[in-house]
Image (spheres, grey):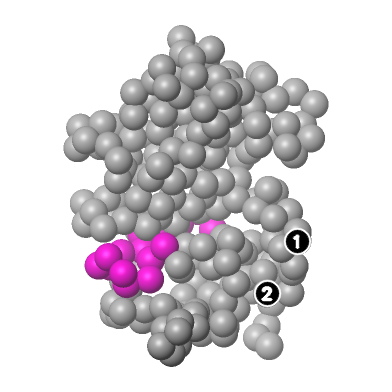
Amino acid sequence: MHAPTSPAIALDVRTLGKRVTLPDGALTILEDVTFTVERGDAVAIVGASGSGKSTLLSLLAGLDTPTSGSVHLDGQSLSTLDEDGRARVRGEKVGFVFQSFQLLPTLTALENVMLPLELRGDADAQAPAKRILEKVGLGARLGHYPRQLSGGEQQRVALARAFVTDPALLFADEPTGNLDTHTGQAIIDLLFSLNADAGTTLVLVTHDEHLAARCRHQIRLDSGRRIA
């Protein structure tokens, strides 16, 4: 057991490892990964395809459990929690942006953004959802369904949904992976602008070195290990 983490630390990761058993033996996806992320920091997890980036992100967010080591998220040890407990921490503290947008097709832009607030039990979900959709430039598209929106607009809805709960941490997995260069650049500008306004801790997985360079720190993985 190590000492409780400082209040200034958003993520404290110690000797994290992930192995899976395959028919022909064990496969090590991550090995002995250690780092801390300060509150309000912006960190990029970079590395070649298959280096363990998305697995690391899943472990940091408590979507998956490590084989060894520990993750403290905003002072909470994820390994001491069951699946429900980890889900509760995510609901209270974490926002997500994915490459594939992950919007619900049967809900309008406004309803997609209201959803996490409704799941949390907020009395008024509509006003804050409207406010943030206006902030991301979609005030005129509130009643549109995902299929009526361009890729860039869908990712703006996804950003609005991620930030509407005022999360302590935002995890983004290849947030521009499905967008053309121009649209992707606009989404990144928006992501960093929303992040600065909210003072959120940002952790993003990317293979884009330009995007990684905009973060204050980079965590570089090679074959599941952190390299300098």
Side (left or right) of 120 relative to 29: right
| Residue 98 or residue 195, whichever sits in front | 98
- Disc 2 marks a residue whose amino acid type is Ser
Q: Position of residue 58 (x, y in %)?
A: 51, 63
Q: Is residue 93 above or below residue 131?
A: below
Residue at mark 1:
85
Q: Position of residue 6 (x, y in %)?
A: 63, 71
Q: Is residue 33 above or below residue 220?
A: below
Q: Quadrant of the N terminus?
A: bottom right
Q: Secondary structure at mark 2?
A: helix
Q: Position of residue 111 (x, y in %)?
A: 61, 23
Residue drawn at 46 percent across, 24 percent down: 146
Q: CA distance from mark 1 to mark 2?
A: 10 Å
172 magenta-colored: no
| Residue 49 or residue 11, whichever sits in front | 49
Q: Position of residue 14 (x, y in %)?
A: 54, 81
Residue 42 in sight here: no
> Circles 1 and 2: CB distance less than 8 Å?
no
Q: Which mark is residue 119?
A: none
User: Pointer 1: residues within 10 angstroms few (<14), some, or many (20+)?
Assistant: some
Residue 78 in sight here: yes
- Disc 1 marks a residue whose amino acid type is Gly
Residue at mark 2:
79
- Looking at the image, how many numbered discs can be counted on the residues? 2
| Between discs 1 and 2, the one toward the N terminus | 2
Residue lying farthest to the top in this orientation: 140
Residue drawn at 33 percent across, 29 percent down: 152
The magenta segment = 39-54
